[in-house]
Amino acid sequence: MKLLVSIILGLLFNSCVYNKEKIELPSPEITYTNYAKNIVSENCLACHISGYNTNGTPAGNRNFTTYLGVKQAVDDGLFRLHVIDGVAPTMPFELPQLSQEIKDTLTIWINQGAKE
């Protein structure tokens, strides 16, 4: 009887497998400082540096040189509308749209509260 119990327990415990699968840790929180600022600098500041385009015409009175300037456009919905959703006039203006990966990451940033 002890032999039968030992065999059953042995089979039971041998069937348990330690899962060595790599566990993905969550990435750091997406913030303006660690992500969005670089995207804005590379794609928006050619026009939105002082609220005016480099040729002196108004750029929607948007100054994206600071977090507060970008945050204002996020809060009023225009950033999402023109940069992410692609509603005309699409941004960056007269340039290729941002990649879907960048748009998705910016969407996450906005949905998390567009933190600085």
Image (cartoon, rainbow, N blue to C red):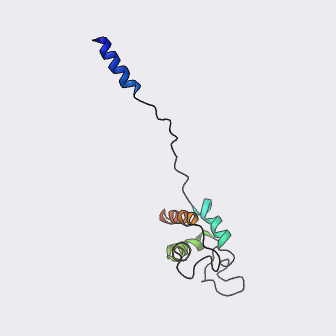
> In front here: 45 or 72?
45
Coordinates of residue 20 in the picture (x, y in percent): 50, 35
> In front here: 100 or 48?
100
Coordinates of residue 66 in the picture (x, y in percent): 63, 70
Residue at the limit of the structure toward the bottom, as seen here:
57
Q: Measured along the vertical axis of the image, is residue 105 above or below residue 51?
A: above
Which residue occupies 68% across, 69% down?
42
Which residue occupies 34% across, 16% down?
6
Q: Quadrant of residue 65?
A: bottom right
Which residue occupies 38% across, 24% down?
13
Quarter placement of the N terminus: top left
Q: Measured along the vertical axis of the image, is residue 45 above or below residue 11?
A: below
Coordinates of residue 95 in the picture (x, y in percent): 65, 77
Residue 115 in view in this figure:
no
Residue at the limit of the structure toward the right, as seen here:
55
Residue 107 in view in this figure:
yes
Residue at the limit of the structure toward the left, as seen here:
1
Coordinates of residue 19 in the picture (x, y in percent): 47, 35
Quarter placement of the C terminus: bottom right
Q: Quadrant of residue 88?
A: bottom right
Q: Is residue 75 left or right of residue 70?
A: left
Q: Measured along the vertical axis of the image, is residue 105 above or below residue 47?
A: above
